[in-house]
Image (cartoon, helix red, strand yellow):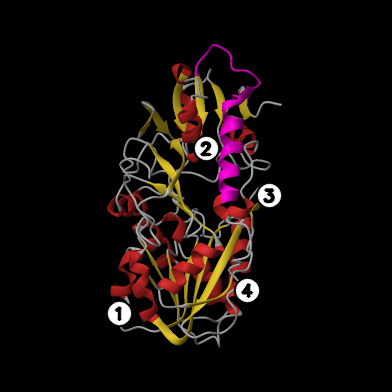
Amino acid sequence: MPPDLHRPCPLCGNRAPDLLGALSLPQPSHSPLPSGYRLVACTACDLVYADTPAVQADYDHYYQQLAKYGGPTGTGAGQNPADQRRLEQLADRLEALLPGRDAAILDIGCGAGGLLQVLHSRGYTRAEGLDPDPAAVAAARAQGLPVRAGLATESPGLYAGCEFKLIVLSHVAEHLRDLDWLDGLHRLLAPDGALYVEVPDPRGYDCTRRPPLYYFDSEHINHFSPRALARLFTRMGLHPTAFPATPLILSDGSPYPAFAGIATRVQRGIDESGDGNARCVDTLRGYLADSLQRSAASLGIQPPLGPGPVLVWGAGSWTQRLLGAGTIPLAQVRAFLDSAPNKQGQLLAGKPIVAPADGLSRHPDAQVLVCIAVNPHQIGAEVARLEPDRTRSLHFITEPT
C-alpha cells in the first residue's frame, strides 16, 4: 500500500492499491488542484486512478470557475468541425437507445450544450442538461436550451421525482474524485431507461501519436476499463449491456481512444465487459513505463532556443507536464500565452499567463516555444494573424530520435 494513501479505490474501497508512479503537474496560481499525484491501481477492479490529495470540493470549485469547458468555444460546444462531428456521432449512438422523440433525456456535465443542441435539432425537445460552470449554463441558455446549474454529485437530489429514459455522462466520469453519489442515480431512470457513460479508453493509450504521459493529467483522475465500468454499474444496481468502442477524431485528424458503457435497470442483453481479456491495469503499466522512458531520454526543442527571452504558448496540461519534467527553460520565460480567459491573470511557475496578443505585443523580440499537444503547428498561422508584419521565431517540443 502506498504510504499516506489519500484515496482508496473509488469502486470497492480497497486501501491497498498498487503504486504505479508519480506525476509532477505544476498548476496555475488560482487552481485548487494538486501540483502532482501518485498513480495507483486496484487490480481487483481493473481501475487505474489518481491518489489525489485534493477533495471533491476542490474539483467542484475548479469545474465551476477554472476549467476550459464553460465558454461557448469550450469542448462540447460544437464550435469547430471536429467537435460538431463528434456530437453528431454521439447523438447517433444515443438515438439507438431511445424509444421515441418524446423521451426525457438528462445530459450530466453538458457544458455549453452542444449535445443538447444536436438532440433538439433532431426533435428530442425533452433533452435537458446540468453543468457546474455558470458560464457554460449561460451559453447554453442563450441558445434556448434547458440547462440547470449544479454539480454532477447533486443530480440525484436536484432531479428527485423525475424519470428519464436516458441519462448521459459523456467524458465526465473520468473527472470525478468521488463516485458514491452515482449509487443514487438509478432512481432517476425510468423502468425501461438506460445510462450511457463514455470515457477515454486506456486500451488505446500509447506514445506513437501523442507526447509521453499525454493521457495522464490534472483532470483525468480515473482510467476506467470496461471491467471497471461494469463493476460500477453493478454497484449502482444496474445491468451492464454493452461496451462499444467510440473513438474520437480530434481537430488534427488523429484518433483519441474512447469507449462507452451502457447499462439498464432491466437486463436487455449480454454483459460484454470482456472478463476474458487482458486487464487494462497491465496495459497502463506498460504505457506509463514507456512514457517515463521517453521523458527520461530528454525531450528536445527544435530549432534550439537562442539566449533571448521566451514566450511559452500554452498553459495547459502539456505545459504542466513539461514544467514538471524540467524541459522548459524557465529562466528565459517572460510569460505563458493562453487564449482561455479564466487562466489569464494567473501565474504559472511564477510567470504571468496572458492573452496571446498581449504577450506578443509586450515582448516583440521574444522567441515562442509552442507547448500544444494537438496540432501545434496551427500556432504558426495564429502568430501570423496577430503579427502580419513581423516574423517571429517559433520552436517546438520534439522527442529524441
Farthest residue, direction right? 401
Q: Of label 2 and label 4, which has the lower sequence position?
A: 4
* Mark 4 → mark 3, Cα distance in angstroms: 21 Å
Residue bearing mark 3: 254
Identified by mark 1, the residue type is Ala
Q: Is residue 391 visible?
A: no
Residue bearing mark 4: 92
- State the mark number for residue 318: 2
* Mark 3 → mark 2, Cα distance in angstroms: 17 Å
**198 in magenta:** no
Residue bearing mark 1: 160
Q: Is residue 261 visible?
A: yes
Identified by mark 4, the residue type is Asp
* Image-based side of 193 in relation to 394, left or right: left
**304 in magenta:** yes
Does the CB distance between marks 1 and 2 fall below 8 Å? no
**In the rendered image of this protein, does residue 326 appear above or below residue 188?**
above
Q: Residue at x 45, y 61 (%)?
A: 173
Does the CB distance between marks 1 and 3 fall below 8 Å? no
Q: Residues within 10 Å of mark 1 (few under 14, many from 20)?
A: few
Q: Position of residue 201 (x, y in %)?
A: 58, 56
Q: Of label 1 and label 3, which has the lower sequence position?
A: 1
Q: Residue at x 35, y 40 (%)?
A: 34
User: Which of the 4 quarters of the picture holds residue 140?
Assistant: bottom left
